[in-house]
Amino acid sequence: MALILSIETSTEYCSVVIGNQGQQIAVAESETPMSHATELTLLINACCQQSDYTLDQLDGISVSIGPGSFTALRIGLSTAKGIAYALDKPLVAISSLLIQANRSRLFRQSETETETNILYIPMIDARRMEVYTAYFNNKLEVVSPPKALILEKNSFDPLRKKYDKVILCGNGAIKAGTLYTDPFFEYGPKNIHANAMIQLAEKAWKTKQFADLAYVEPYYLKPPNITKPKKIL
Amino acid sequence: MSVLILAIESSCDDTSAAVVRDGVVLSNCVASQEAHRLYGGVVPEVASRAHQVHLIPVVDQALKEAVIEKTALSAIAFTRGPGLMGSLMVGVSFAKAMGLALHIPLIDVNHMRAHILAHFAEDPKPEFPFLSLTVSGGHTQLVVVRDFFEMTIIGQTIDDAAGEAFDKTGKLLGLDYPAGPLIDQLAQNGQPKFPFPEPKIEGLDFSFSGLKTSILYFLRKQIKAQPDFIQENLADICASVQHRIITILLNKLEQAVAQTGIKRVALAGGVSANSALRDGLKERALANQWEAFVPKFAYCTDNAAMVGVTAYYKYLIGQFAAQDVAPSPRLSMTL
Ligand SMILES: Nc1ncnc2c1ncn2[C@@H]1O[C@H](COP(=O)(O)OP(=O)(O)OP(=O)(O)O)[C@@H](O)[C@H]1O
Ligand SMILES: [Mg+2]
């Protein structure tokens, strides 16, 4: 049973929640895109005020670790580290793709009970037609690990044999809309939100799946883009 | 009660943390990033990633060396700019979160002012007003410092910075990044026998891009006649380039003294670690009866001690930042 602050900053909007024993007791989200740098700690403060808890009363911090926008992830993780380090709290790092899949699953909870042959395909927007994605089954177990994928008309055709339906969600699913229109594809929520972290964080906290506070890094999924120096003389 | 400040610096490729009590440095820890050597310059994305894993170990070490508990801190200070956006973001976000968690105020610091105010970390401290020649990897400035917070730039580079001139020359010579310290070392066994022209720039401004081009052409020409010219003459080339950069700097400084009448002068920034520049300043000071200040080596290149010292003086007048403060990569000197 834990009181956990969850921070989500993988995309252009950020959000914060406080969960108590797996239940949301405070929530705040940005209204301006890419305003994480100015807004994030204000949102955290707002959650504290809403819930009447102070940060030192928390049992832990959870943070969306990526993939996502590099800068946005860095703001979220640096902020989470700052609080966890200052107050000696454990840190839980959760995949943004798992958060997005969970959010989608929460949206269709009642249907989910009966369906077994479905796949959650969360997509975080990368550049052009590229997305970061992973496949999760109905129990949110990883079926296919995170990767960067350039969306093409037939990208998901191999899945048709095994699954009745796939659920595309996340901000990357916005550009998928024109490519995948037949009933095999269902669309889930296009935005990610910290409210889908509460149960995941609670579970990780209970099983003590803590991140190494000093050395944990965002899950970038891609190496830095480096142009080799050219010969000059 | 004493004022205890934890300061964080992450504007470029060094991650640094310091603890400063009442303006006195208790600890100053720096983690440098070796990775950039391979690329011949700072790669912003690589730097941002490295800050993320260096920051807590460096902060932790700074607190331990100072024997200070986090809960005893009076404020958290951080470099807000100028610098690289991604790098600044890590330090600023972390500092803000620590301030929020510990319920203590934030102090945002201008990196270029901090380089100058590093002189207040130790005695003797310069009296106001003084002239600062700030020479670093990104800046070359002549600044009239009237007070901790009143600084006016009276001259600056119109293209490359002095540190850049060292580093780019190093690249031409096949030296690792940053080449400044290497050129300094190599030059000690050389003579400034290759003449490079002094640029004719009006007023108190500087220019180093012409020098870079003339070095490039000079080397190309020599290599054509003698393929191992660089290897054979490395020390002399370094001494010649260094000599030219330094005379450009000191000549302008002399001009600035004449123009302002301020005979108290100070060096600041990474290039002020250069031994020939330090010696050159002392010589001119002696000849012209200036009072000269050179910073301790630890306070030349990027460090958090200078951020903490600057923050202390802001603390005294209650200049704090709100929680909505964000990094400012192009922060100007007046802020
Ligand atoms: N002994 C030396 N001789 C010459 N140059 C040096 C020496 N030591 C360091 N430098 C130069 O100093 C620069 C680094 O200084 P500093 O860390 O202050 O710069 P920066 O923080 O990258 O730039 P800025 O402060 O303008 O944002 C590099 O260009 C480096 O080559
Ligand atoms: Mg600097």
Image (tube, coloured by chain):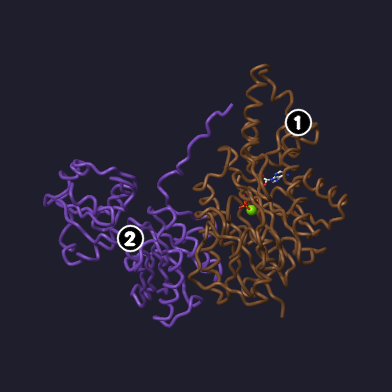
Chain colours: A purple, B brown
Quarter holding the N terminus of chain A?
A: bottom left
Badge 1: chain ID? B
Q: Mark 1 falls on what kind of element?
A: helix
Q: What residue type is labelled 2?
A: Ile
- Give the left or right position of residue A179, taking residue B181 as reference: left
Quarter holding the C terminus of chain A?
A: top right
State the residue position of label 2: A99
Estimate the x, y position of residue A106 in percent, counting from the top left: 25, 66
Estimate the x, y position of residue B114 in percent, counting from the top left: 66, 61
Residue drawn at (28%, 63%) of the image: A103
**Residue sticking out furthest to the left:** A183
- Give the left or right position of residue A105, taking residue B326 as reference: left
Q: Which amino acid does label 1 sit on?
A: Ala
Nearest the viewer among B249 and B317 is: B249
- Asked whether disc 2 touches disc 1, contact meaning CB atoms under 8 Å apart, the reply is no
Residue drawn at (40%, 81%) of the image: A51
State the residue position of label 1: B235
Estimate the x, y position of residue A180 in percent, counting from the top left: 17, 48
In the image, residue A59 above or below residue A179:
below
Q: Which mark is residue A122?
A: none
Q: How crowded is mark 1: few (under 14 residues within 10 Å), some or many (20 or more)?
A: many
Nearest the viewer among B151 and B46 is: B151
Badge 2: chain ID? A
